[in-house]
């Protein structure tokens, strides 16, 4: 491989050039950076520094751009918003090899960021893979968090008992073999609604994951917004983090279960499950929400209309919901469902 065409900042590590982010739609926020180990992490720090902290953690295949419609509402209400980009996403550094990404690596980086910034009394909003990572972060630093809102996400764990412990131990190697035997999935199979396994097979084996296309399918974004989601990736080599994320979902079931048993099942602070009724992820997999009901203080509301990326379709309304949650009176809301013709994407 000819690395001269890449912005290589360390062996095996890429950094997206700043010019890739020029003129992004509705993203006027100042970039902040923190170096953790040998990796530079980008994060937004908006609003008054003395304000109560709201921590927004993105998932797959997004970055802090996802929260641009929410941040103005939250900061106007006096909150300090921290929104990091995980390694491999947004303005954070990106590892070239998929083998350098792991669930634990993401947890470690986000824990260190919170410690370095000395964040406390945090309201955490976690979404998609942000829940998989964020709930583990919360389990490692529970005293720093005051409340949690989880949307269209979960933390994969199989529950208590010898049989489930055995399943947790063997599921990951079996899953890897199963995906290998099934082989690649096409973009058409994914967009055509062939199921979550098709998404994993597509993202894992494709040469160039279509991040903008994914956001059009699941987030109904405009062409300029689609370009913004592709902006962090000048070419496919930068996309290893997004490529491997779905494949890693069952990779740490035992650690996830430990997080439930040691912390989350004992959680005594507010915890809100706020799913959208047109989310194909939680909608087609009710077990994901059932897992979060293990948290004793969990309460649930339904947001009617939006799909998986409700931050795109209902950003300001969703920010208001978070504020109401902080004030102790969260309420769901209804908005008109956006419909996209998938034939325009195929």
Image: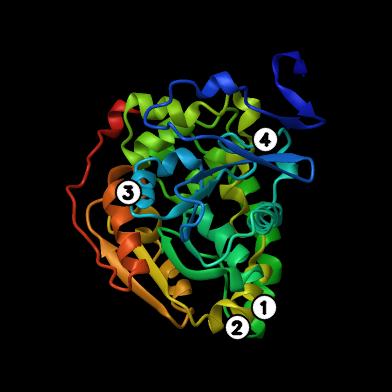
**Local SS, label 1:** helix
Q: Disc 3 vs disc 1: which is toward the camera?
A: 3
Distance from disc 4 to disc 2, alpha carbons, whole Å, reads 36 Å
| Colour style of the rendered protein structure | rainbow
- Return the residue at label 4: 94
Q: Disc 3 vs disc 4: which is toward the camera?
A: 3
The quarter of the image holding the N terminus is: top right
- Return the residue at label 3: 73
Residues at badges 2 and 1 in contact (C-beta under 8 Å)? yes
Q: Position of residue 100 (x, y in %)?
A: 75, 43
Of the two numbered discs 1 and 4 on the same chain, state the one appearing first in sequence.
4
User: 338 or 345, which lies in front?
Assistant: 338
Of the two numbered discs 3 and 1 on the same chain, state the one appearing first in sequence.
3
User: 305 or 159, which lies in front?
Assistant: 305
- Return the residue at label 2: 160
Of the two numbered discs 4 and 2 on the same chain, state the one appearing first in sequence.
4
Q: Residue at x 58, y 39 (%)?
A: 242
Q: Position of residue 269 (x, y in %)?
A: 47, 78
């Amino acid at each position: 491989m000819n690395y001269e065409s890449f912005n290589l900042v360390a062996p095996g590590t890429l950094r997206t050039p700043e010019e890739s982010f020029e003129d992004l739609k509705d993203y006027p926020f100042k970039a902040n950076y923190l170096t953790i180990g040998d990796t530079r992490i980008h994060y937004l720090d908006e609003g008054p520094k003395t304000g109560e902290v709201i921590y927004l953690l993105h998932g797959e295949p997004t970055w802090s751009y996802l929260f641009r419609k929410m941040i103005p509402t939250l900061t106007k209400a006096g909150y300090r918003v921290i929104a990091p980009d995980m390694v491999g996403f947004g303005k954070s550094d990106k590892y070239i090899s998929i083998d350098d990404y792991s669930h634990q690596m993401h947890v470690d980086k986000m824990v260190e960021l919170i410690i370095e910034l000395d964040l406390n009394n945090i309201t955490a909003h976690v979404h998609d893979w942000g829940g998989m990572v964020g709930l583990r972060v919360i389990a490692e630093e529970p005293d720093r968090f005051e409340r949690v809102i989880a949307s269209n996400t979960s933390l994969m764990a199989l529950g208590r008992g010898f049989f489930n412990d055995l399943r947790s131990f063997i599921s990951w190697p079996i899953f890897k073999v199963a995906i290998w035997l099934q082989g690649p999935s096409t973009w058409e199979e994914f967009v055509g609604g062939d199921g979550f396994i098709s998404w994993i097979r597509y993202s894992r084996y494709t040469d160039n994951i279509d991040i903008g296309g994914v956001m059009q399918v699941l987030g109904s974004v405009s062409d300029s917004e689609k370009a913004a989601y592709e902006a962090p990736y000048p070419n496919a080599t930068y996309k290893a983090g997004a490529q491997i994320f779905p494949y890693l979902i069952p990779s740490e079931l035992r650690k996830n279960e430990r997080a439930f048993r040691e912390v989350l099942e004992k959680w005594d602070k507010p915890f809100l499950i706020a799913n959208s009724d047109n989310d194909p992820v939680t909608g087609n997999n009710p077990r994901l929400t059932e897992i979060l009901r293990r948290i004793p203080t969990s309460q649930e509301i339904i947001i009617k209309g939006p799909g998986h990326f409700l931050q795109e379709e209902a950003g300001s309304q969703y920010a208001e919901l978070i504020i109401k949650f902080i004030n102790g009176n969260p309420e769901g809301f209804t908005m008109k469902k956006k419909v996209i013709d998938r034939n325009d994407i195929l």
